[in-house]
């Protein structure tokens, strides 16, 4: 499942950016994301703050159902039981959320890139060079590193929770929180990429 999540993140991230920059802009079918290796990139430095952006018009965020940490159990509910299926369901929900984010935002982003190519009069070779900064820069790298770190945590927590003799509901809450943060991080990255591209189109 971790490989699936990595592939979904890559569709809007660094690996996906390489595929977009190397694709033929006039052939939509050639803009497919490339597979991401299972080994995550180096995690972001602890003192490196993740940038936050406000979503511009046209950028769609997504919050998968039940990805927030559960509220504290009231008195008498301390015996709440969590099972392996609960941990697996959280991972499945997050995978669906990331997939929907890509499906919602990727076509519009590709179209804006084509508009910029036409506006600037770039040849195909020029496009390969000039489009790269819109999908790959230092700030996008921070989003990707944060996503990789979250994926590593999710993989560890998900395995621990699913294999525990008595699954821990507190651990499940931590998994849900990280999943929602992952979705929020990817939403913020899409927002930043759209803002950068919209600025260039307005010039």
Image: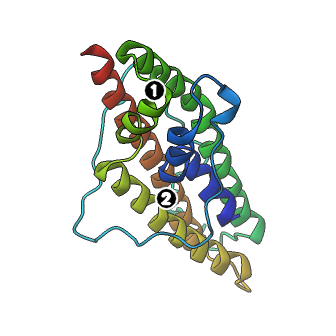
Residue at point 49% right, 61% down?
Answer: 178
Q: Secondary structure at mark 2?
A: helix
Considering only vertical position in the picture, is 201 above or below 40? above
Residue 116, numbered label: none
Q: How many marks?
A: 2
Query: Badge 1, how many Cα within 10 Å: few under 14, some, many 20+?
Result: many
Tell me if residue 115 can be seen. Answer: yes
89 lies above or below 17:
below
Q: Quadrant of residue 190?
A: top left
* Quadrant (top left, top right, bottom left, bottom right) of the C terminus: top left
Quadrant in the picture for residue 127: top left
Residue 145 position within the rendered picture, expressed as x and y whole percent measured from the top left: 40, 62
Q: Are marks 1 and 2 in contact (CB under 8 Å)?
A: no
The residue tagged 1 is 59
Q: Is residue 55 above or below residue 17?
A: above
Q: Is residue 180 left or right of residue 89?
A: left
Q: Position of residue 172 (x, y in %)?
A: 59, 67
- Identify the residue at horizontal 53%, vertical 71% (top origin): 152
């Amino acid at each position: 499942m971790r490989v699936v999540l990595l592939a979904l993140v890559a569709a809007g991230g660094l690996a996906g950016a390489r595929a977009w920059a190397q694709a033929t802009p006039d052939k939509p079918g050639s803009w497919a994301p490339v597979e991401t290796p299972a080994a995550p990139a180096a995690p972001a430095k602890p003192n490196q703050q993740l940038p936050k952006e406000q979503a511009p018009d046209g950028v769609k965020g997504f919050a998968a159902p039940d990805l927030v940490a559960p509220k504290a159990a009231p008195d008498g509910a301390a015996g709440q039981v969590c099972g392996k299926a609960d941990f697996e369901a959280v991972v499945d929900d997050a995978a669906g959320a990331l997939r929907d984010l890509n499906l919602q935002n990727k076509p519009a982003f590709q179209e804006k890139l084509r508009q910029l190519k036409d506006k600037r009069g770039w040849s195909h070779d020029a496009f390969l060079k000039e489009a790269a900064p819109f999908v790959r820069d230092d700030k996008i790298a921070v989003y990707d590193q944060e996503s990789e770190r979250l994926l590593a945590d999710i993989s560890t927590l998900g395995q621990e929770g699913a294999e525990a003799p008595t699954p821990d509901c507190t651990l499940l809450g931590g998994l849900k929180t990280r999943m929602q943060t992952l979705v929020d991080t990817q939403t913020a990255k899409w927002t930043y990429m759209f803002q950068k591209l919209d600025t260039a189109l307005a010039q």
